[in-house]
Image: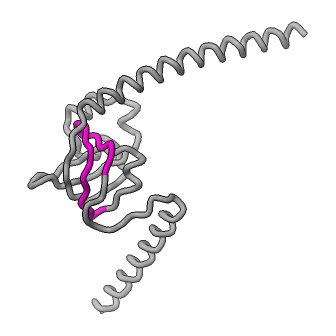
Amino acid sequence: MKILLIILAILAVILIILFILGKRLQKKQEAQQASIDAAAQSMNFFIIDKKMMKITEAGLPKVVVDQTPKYMRRAKLPILKVKVGPRVMSLICDQKVFHTLAPKQEVKATVSGIYVTAAKRIRGPIVETDPKKRKAQEKLEKKEAKRKAKEAKKMGK
């Protein structure tokens, strides 16, 4: 009986600690979101490519790579390679926005520094936002690319 009470007390203490830490992290995240919103600006750009890449391989400025924690350098982030006017640059994208974009697409986006927080398509291919339909669309694109590669191979022979 005493063991059960001790385990229950330990679980209650752990629950209280997790609650306090959760509140702190939520306040910190809200402050970060407010600073991102304050620095946000609207931009038109053409998406050349989009990939999930490590931050060290993404071609981001050295200052950005140096400021990221060591454990985040190994994690893969959604990276967009875009053309803004005559310049080609790499931007980090929000995960939700990343899935709604396609390469070879011109978009009007809200950008905070090098972080894309929102995007709306201007010109280019329409991308399905529903995850189930999106997977089906990607499978069709892969099949079509394979078919075109086979045709090109036959033409070359």
Residue plotted at (23% across, 48% down): 90
Please report the bounds of the magenta region as a residue range: 103-119
- The prevailing secondary structure element of the residues shown in magenta is strand
Residue 2 or residue 127, whichever sits in front: 127
Q: Residue furthest top?
A: 2
Residue 12 located left or right of residue 41: right
Which quadrant does the C terminus fall into? Answer: bottom left
Residue 115 or residue 128, whichever sits in front: 128
Q: Is residue 112 magenta?
A: yes
Which quadrant does the N terminus fall into? Answer: top right
Q: Is residue 154 magenta?
A: no
Looking at the image, is 49 positioned above or below residue 77? below
Looking at the image, is 9 positioned above or below residue 97? above
Q: Which of the 4 image quadrants contains residue 35? A: top left
Residue plotted at (32% across, 68% down): 125
| Residue 74 x/y as whole percent | 39, 39
Q: Which of the 4 image quadrants contains residue 144? A: bottom left
Tell me the colour scheme of the image.
one colour
Residue 132 or residue 145, whichever sits in front: 132
| Residue 9 x/y as whole percent | 75, 10
What is the total number of numbered labels drawn onto the structure image?
Answer: 0
| Residue 136 x/y as whole percent | 51, 69
Residue plotted at (85% across, 10% down): 3
Residue 61 located left or right of residue 52: left
Q: Residue furthest left?
A: 86
Residue plotted at (51% across, 58% down): 131
| Residue 139 x/y as whole percent | 48, 70
Residue 70 located left or right of residue 7: left
